[in-house]
């Protein structure tokens, strides 16, 4: 068993200022699986949703200003949970991990500069972490915070579908350190499409949960009245495209302005989810996946979860989705990626970093 390490993780890539203090322990169990224990000592997220809501999307200059304001406050909250020591145990931070990309460059820099100053002050090492790896490794986090947990059940090969406001990526994971991107979106991310459709329907930001709620309210006999295109569903590649679907919704609303919002939400969600599920299952079959993992903000979507769970069962593969609170941006997943994933230099922010 290796020495446990305490990581302070910092995440500022988009519109959440997040910090977490995580006690990580890696256990080597047999040859086949390695298991991990992530004990979450503190987890703070300052959300900027209210700031960006009037604009229907994230405004980078406002996000940067909010991060600068929130970082010292969030750090103080972390310290309050950590000092005086929890349950008489004394903790020492072993290293700091900070998201270096991808994300909004001015936002990434706020976290990076804060982390650099703190590492210097505390005289501890600092490493850079990929936000996308954070989402990928969120499936290894405990489902009940503060309770030690080890998930050894994710067997490889695994197919991971990362769906968020900024990304739509299908990846093949052959081990914890070896993966390959099979496909990604050629235009809008699926979460972005949910947000844009919500905006067209004058629903509040972020639109994903709102669209899902209205879609779920449509009775069975009322479903399927509108058929939106399912972009690239029969395309040979594992790439996605959601901008055409979004435009179809726009034109449909222009031509049929009195359509109930629920019907639009149902049919849009169906088109988007069916493409995601079709390509994920196709990849799972091709690569004989033993596990299928979902992550990112859109992973909270119940219809998407249900369809992927059913597909996994058919293939006798395990299905994994993180606890809801780890789907949206947070720093606990950054600590997990700091321990399990690639270590990046913190010389500069990498706004376009890919998986
Ligand atoms: O991962 P995340 O917090 O931020 C990014 O890194 O982008 O994802 C946020 C995205 C938003 O687009 C939001 O509308 C979407 O996730 N989302 C959902 C649901 N909950 C959040 N989309 C569909 N259904 C949901 N239930
Ligand atoms: Zn994210």
Image (cartoon, helix red, strand yellow):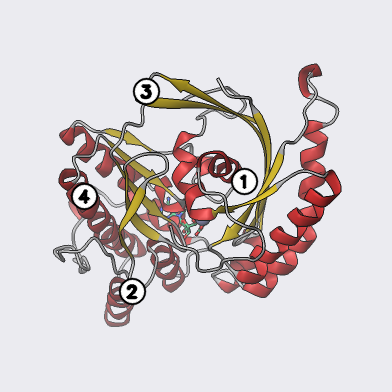
Q: How many C-alpha atoms fall within 10 Å of the one at disc 2: few (<14), some, or many (≥20)?
A: some
- Quarter of the image where one finds residue 248: bottom left
Any part of residue 155 in sight? yes
How many numbered discs sit on the rendered protein?
A: 4
Task: Check if mark 2's residue and mark 1's residue have beta carbons within 8 Å.
Answer: no
Mark 2 secondary-structure assignment: helix
Task: Check if mark 3's residue and mark 1's residue have beta carbons within 8 Å.
Answer: no
Q: Disc 4 versus disc 3: distance between alpha carbons?
A: 26 Å
Q: Quadrant of the C terminus?
A: bottom left
- Viewer-closest of 145 and 26: 26
- Residue highlighted by disc 1: 331
Q: Where is residue 352 drawn, in percent x and y?
A: 50, 68
- Residue 215 versus residue 250 in the image, above or below: above
Q: Where is residue 246 drawn, in percent x and y?
A: 33, 72
Q: Disc 2 versus disc 4: distance between alpha carbons?
A: 23 Å
Q: Quadrant of the N terminus?
A: top right
Q: Disc 4 versus disc 1: distance between alpha carbons?
A: 30 Å
The dot on residue 283 is: 4
- Residue highlighted by disc 3: 31
- Residue highlighted by disc 2: 243
Q: How many C-alpha atoms fall within 10 Å of the one at disc 1: few (<14), some, or many (≥20)?
A: many
């Amino acid at each position: 068993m290796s020495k446990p390490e305490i990581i302070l993780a910092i995440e500022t890539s988009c519109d959440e200022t997040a910090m977490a203090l995580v006690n990580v322990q890696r256990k080597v169990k047999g040859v086949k699986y390695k298991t991990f224990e992530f004990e979450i000592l503190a987890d703070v997220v300052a959300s900027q949703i209210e700031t960006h809501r009037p604009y229907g999307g994230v405004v980078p200059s406002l996000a940067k200003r909010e991060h600068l304001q929130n970082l010292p406050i969030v750090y103080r909250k972390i310290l309050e949970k950590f000092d005086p020591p929890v349950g008489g145990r004394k903790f020492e931070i072993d290293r700091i991990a900070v998201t270096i990309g991808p994300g909004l460059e001015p936002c990434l820099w706020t976290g990076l500069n804060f982390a650099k100053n703190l590492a210097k002050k505390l005289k501890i090492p600092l490493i850079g972490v990929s936000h996308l790896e954070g989402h990928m490794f969120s499936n290894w986090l405990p489902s009940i915070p503060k309770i030690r947990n080890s998930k050894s059940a994710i067997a490889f090969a695994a197919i991971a579908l990362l769906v968020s406001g900024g990304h739509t990526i299908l990846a093949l994971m052959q081990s914890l350190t070896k993966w390959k991107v099979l496909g990604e979106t050629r235009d809008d991310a699926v979460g972005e499409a949910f947000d844009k459709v919500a905006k067209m329907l004058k629903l509040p930001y972020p639109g994903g949960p709102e669209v899902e709620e209205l879609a779920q309210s449509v009775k069975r006999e009322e479903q399927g009245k509108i058929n939106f295109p399912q972009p690239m569903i029969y395309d040979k590649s594992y790439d996605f495209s959601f901008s055409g679907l979004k435009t179809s919704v726009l034109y449909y609303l222009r031509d049929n302005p009195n359509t109930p919002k629920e019907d639009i939400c149902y049919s849009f969600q169906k088109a988007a989810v069916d493409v995601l599920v079709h390509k994920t299952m196709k990849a799972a079959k091709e690569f004989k996946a033993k596990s299928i993992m979902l992550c990112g903000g859109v992973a909270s979507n119940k219809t998407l979860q249900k369809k992927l769970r059913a597909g996994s069962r058919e293939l006798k593969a395990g299905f994994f989705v993180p606890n809801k609170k780890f789907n949206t941006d947070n720093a606990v997943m950054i600590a997990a990626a700091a321990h399990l994933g690639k270590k990046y230099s913190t010389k500069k922010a990498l706004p376009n970093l890919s998986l």
